[in-house]
Image (cartoon, rainbow, N blue to C red):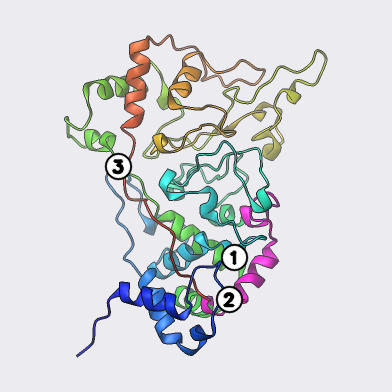
């Protein structure tokens, strides 16, 4: 008869023998008790069946251009949360993409290694694998989810590594080899495999079955009267659907709302009005100045402040920004115009935004990591 093992007991035993979090040193007992440590490791981050997309998310993992498997997802989950893959050993993907905040963050801009800060806030990754157009990051500089996973690794303000150092760091952790082999058929460790594993984990971060989804599926009681009024505004007078469309409520395109604009000095190049040129830095087109990718509105209540630079403190202020037609500048999007919403309409629209909170993505960091 096979003996069943209590995962909680394995975790406690692993702590005793030294199979601990990335910040903890490896003890001599770990080496002498590899099977116990390995069993505890796998109990903490077990293979799980691939999730079924929740109500409102029509896309399927099988439709992605890369193959998602439980083994890749498990490996990617470790890599996503592993701070050892940063220059100071303190920053992981999850540092800025916090599950509790819709895989975004509550800071205006991200803080990376050695306390360095950039100009942008981490965008959410909910349903990110199923973009209408294959572009990622606020400026669209990545053309695949795997490429997006590689970007922060080599950014000196984020994880502060090089891709070569990332691979070297992974090779220096012998415990990862088994899980690369399980995911890919052999234990070769390279950047493309690591990035695809992270992308596989990210692809399973679904958000759906919100009150909005249930209402659209026929449950007329799922939305309150103010939320129903807000829904009508969203798809009608307020014209939010012009950019926030599809299952993930984003067109995956780039728009200038005037966020970040400061009137330049007389005679100065008007482009200096934006300290961050946005999409223009990638496309090279002047008309893309100050334009940034439309974020998903899924679970937007969880991740204030808002916009690419975190400069809009609340959803109420977001609604006000759109109501006044953005901030005028030479490249303001043609979709931006004053809406003339009444106070009651603004409240209804805000109520509807709160109905976009879903489920299916929440997670916590693994307690144990390969060593």
Residue shown at 57%/34% (left/top)?
Answer: 308
Please tell me how crowded label 3 is: few (under 14), some (14-19), or many (20+) other residues with Cα within 10 Å.
many
Mark 3 to mark 1 CA distance (whole Å): 36 Å
User: Is label 2 in contact with label 1 (beta carbons under 8 Å)?
Assistant: yes
> For the residue labelled by badge 2, is the local secondary structure a helix, a strand or a loop?
loop
Kindly check if marks 3 and 2 are in contact, taking CB atoms under 8 A apart as contact: no
Provide the residue span drawn in magenta. 151-176
- Mark 2 or mark 1: name the one nearer the start of the chain: 1
* Magenta region includes residue 194: no
Residue occupied by mark 3: 56
State the CA–CA distance, disc 2 to disc 1: 10 Å
Is residue 237 depicted above or below 352 in this figure? above
Q: Residue at x 31, y 72 (%)?
A: 8
Q: Which residue in the protein does label 1 denote?
A: 84
Upstream in sequence: badge 3 or badge 2 = 3
- Residue 157 lies, with reference to residue 66, above or below; the image says above
Whole-percent x, y for residue 350 in the image: 36, 23
Mark 1 Cα shell of 10 Å, populated few (<14), some (14-19), many (≥20): many
Front residue of this view, candidates 113 and 132: 113
Q: Nearer the viewer, mark 3 or mark 2?
A: 2
Would you say residue 46 is visible in this rendering? no
Residue 60 visible in this rendered orientation of the protein: yes
Q: Which residue is mark 2?
A: 173
- Looking at marks 3 and 1 on the same chain, the residue that comes earlier in the sequence is marked by 3
What is the residue that sits farthest to the front in this orientation? 16
What is the secondary structure assignment of the residue under circle 3?
loop
């Amino acid at each position: 008869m096979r003996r069943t093992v209590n995962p909680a007991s394995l975790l406690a035993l692993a702590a005793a023998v030294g199979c601990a979090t990335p910040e903890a040193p490896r003890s001599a007992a770990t080496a002498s008790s590899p099977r116990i440590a390995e069993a505890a490791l796998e109990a903490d981050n077990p293979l799980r069946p691939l999730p079924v997309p929740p109500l409102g998310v029509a896309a399927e993992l099988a439709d992605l251009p890369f193959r998602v498997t439980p083994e890749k997802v498990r490996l990617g989950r470790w890599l996503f949360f592993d701070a050892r893959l940063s220059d100071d050993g303190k920053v992981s993907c999850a540092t800025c993409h916090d599950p509790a905040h819709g895989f975004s963050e509550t800071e205006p801009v991200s803080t990376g290694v050695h306390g360095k800060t950039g100009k942008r806030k981490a965008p959410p990754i909910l349903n990110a694998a199923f973009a209408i157009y294959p572009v990622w990051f606020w400026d669209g500089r990545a053309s695949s989810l795997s490429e997006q996973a590689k970007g922060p690794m080599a950014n000196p303000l984020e994880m502060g590594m090089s891709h070569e150092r990332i691979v070297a760091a992974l090779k220096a952790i012998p415990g990862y080899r088994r899980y690369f082999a399980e995911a890919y058929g052999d234990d070769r460790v390279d950047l493309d495999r690591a990035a695809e594993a992270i992308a596989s984990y990210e692809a399973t971060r679904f958000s759906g079955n919100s009150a909005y989804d249930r209402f659209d599926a026929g449950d007329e009681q799922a939305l309150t009267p103010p939320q129903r009024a807000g829904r009508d505004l969203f798809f009608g007078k307020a014209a939010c659907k012009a950019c926030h469309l599809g299952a993930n409520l984003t067109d995956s395109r780039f728009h200038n709302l005037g966020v970040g604009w400061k009137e330049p000095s007389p005679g100065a190049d008007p482009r200096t009005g934006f300290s961050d040129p946005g999409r223009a830095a990638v496309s090279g087109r002047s008309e893309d100045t100050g334009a940034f990718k439309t974020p998903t509105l899924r679970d937007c209540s969880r991740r204030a402040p808002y916009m690419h630079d975190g400069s809009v403190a609340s959803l109420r202020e977001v609604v006000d920004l759109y109501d006044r037609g953005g901030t005028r500048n030479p490249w303001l999007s043609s979709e931006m115009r004053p809406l003339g919403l009444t106070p009651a309409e603004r409240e209804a629209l805000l109520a509807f935004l709160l109905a976009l909170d879903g489920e299916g993505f929440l997670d916590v960091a693994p307690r144990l990591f390969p060593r």
